[in-house]
Amino acid sequence: MIKNHKNKFSKLSFFKFIIFLPLIYPFHNFNLFNEVKAGIEFQWDNDPNFRRLKWYQTDPEHRARNTIYFFLRPSDRRTGLLKINMKFPETFKTNIKKEKINLCRVNIGGFDSKTKCLENIPSDFELNKEDGKLTLNIFPYSPLPSSKDSYAVVLKVFNPYRSGLYQFHSYGQSSGQIPVTSYIGTWTIVID
């Protein structure tokens, strides 16, 4: 008789659970489907000549107003730079204006400080669009030194409509007796 009573109790509690589950479900906060911001970058063809550069953006959402800092740290510059060339990806479809581009000496933010420009570097900016490919040439009035300061190319743009990964390649012309243009590295920007 006790076994029969336990069996009825378990069946009754199971039916209560089934009946009340749809009522409880809308009020429960399920955090199972939130995005994971892992900070891991995958590259399928890992080329030893590929150099990953650091960057920072204020808003990664698509179609949002964004300020992107493309950092040139001391470890990225072996010599002074007379010219910086940036190649934009073809799929990065947004309106870029010369007035919204800046080259500055920057404080790279961290735990206790904020990323911000400390000093603007006077420069000429040249935007070229050939065959759908956009390039930006930056000519500082005086060469960027190979000191311990960090510099950044700052873009104030609206993010493109399409989300994804965008790779910006950079080249620099060294300030020596024989100016040579060489690959500096690549910034991989994420738009959600």
Image (cartoon, rainbow, N blue to C red):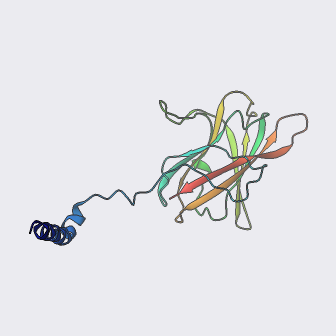
Left or right of 58, for residue 7: left
Camera-nearest residue between 33 and 72: 33
Say whether residue 114 is left or right of residue 87: left
- Residue 10 location in percent, x, y? 17, 67
Residue at position x 19%, y 69% in the image: 14
Q: Is residue 60 above or below residue 55?
A: below
Q: Is residue 85 above or below residue 120?
A: below
**Foreground: 21 or 117?**
21
Q: Residue at x 77, y 43 (%)?
A: 83
Quarter of the figure that contains the N terminus = bottom left
Q: Residue at x 75, y 33 (%)?
A: 142
173 left or right, relative to 170: right
User: In the current view of this chain or complex, which residue is farthest to the top?
Assistant: 148
x then y, percent, for residue 146: 75, 30
| Foreground pick, 118 / 161 | 161
Q: Where does the image place residue 148, in percent across and percent down from the top left?
A: 69, 27
Q: Position of residue 69 (x, y in %)?
A: 58, 44
Most distant residue in the front direction: 1
The one of 86 and 49 positioned closer to us in this rendering:
49
Tally of marks: 0
Residue 6 is drawn in which quadrant?
bottom left
Q: What residue appears at the point 78 percent right and 49 percent down from the top-left corner?
A: 48
